[in-house]
Image: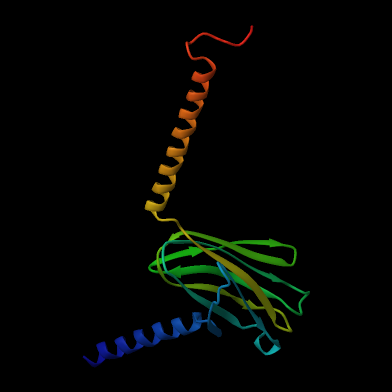
Amino acid sequence: MQKHLSSLLLAVSLAAAGTAAHAAQINSTTPLEFEGKTSTFGSAFDTAQSGQTFQENFTFSTAGASTATSAVISIALNDASALNITGFTLSGNGSSWSGTKSVIGATQYFTLQASNIAAGDYTLAVTGTVNGTAGGSFGGNISVAAVPEASTTAMMLGGLAVVGLAAMRSRRRNQQRQDPGGANLQPA
């Protein structure tokens, strides 16, 4: 019995050590404030944080079905100010979307698009390592727009159909006025 208990404690200790090894050394959560449909976010790291990993979380809520588009950028200034952004994700309500990374020279950026996100709470996470001897920084923005409900779309399509029928009837009426008996009244 004592042997099994010792094995269990060893397994729990190893699992906890493995989890702690993968946790970011710098971790913060900031609620986003939107102006209309858009919000900006970012973080800066100083010399004391050089060489450390980070996970910066930015939170927001949606009231209904929405789409989200976001981007984050970091520009390295030689070795003095540099980050290695390793992840850019949006998660919430059991769903997750990952950003696509691009690097052009000393500039790295991620773009992310998420469609049909349900109402609820979401977290935009930026992860990476501070590589610059003087730290580094990143900045980004996110736009969240409501998706029209199906009934709104149906009413819009119905309205377009009514306008199309009215235009067709008007055109027929004008043709009948120009040619009431079916004969062409215009000179040849």
Numbered disc total: 0
Residue at the extreme right: 78
Q: Position of residue 92 (x, y in %)?
A: 42, 70
Q: Is residue 74 above or below residue 8?
A: above
* Left/right of residue 106 with respect to residue 183 in the rendered view: right
| Quarter the N terminus occupies | bottom left
* Chosen colour scheme: rainbow
Comparing 56 with 161, the one in front is: 161
Q: Is residue 74 above or below residue 172?
A: below
Residue at the extreme bottom: 2
Could you say which quadrant of the image residue 187 lies in?
Answer: top right
Q: Position of residue 168 (x, y in %)?
A: 47, 29
Residue at the extreme top: 188
| Residue lying at 63% horizontally and 70% vertically, measured from the top left | 140
| Residue lying at 45% horizontally and 28% vertically, measured from the top left | 169
* Left/right of residue 3 with respect to residue 87 in the rendered view: left
Residue at the extreme left: 1
Comparing 164 with 55, the one in front is: 164
Q: Position of residue 29 (x, y in %)?
A: 52, 82
Could you say which quadrant of the image residue 87 lies in?
Answer: bottom right
Comparing 38 with 108, the one in front is: 38
| Quarter the C terminus occupies | top right
Q: Position of residue 76 (x, y in %)?
A: 74, 72
| Residue lying at 38% horizontally and 69% vertically, measured from the top left | 93
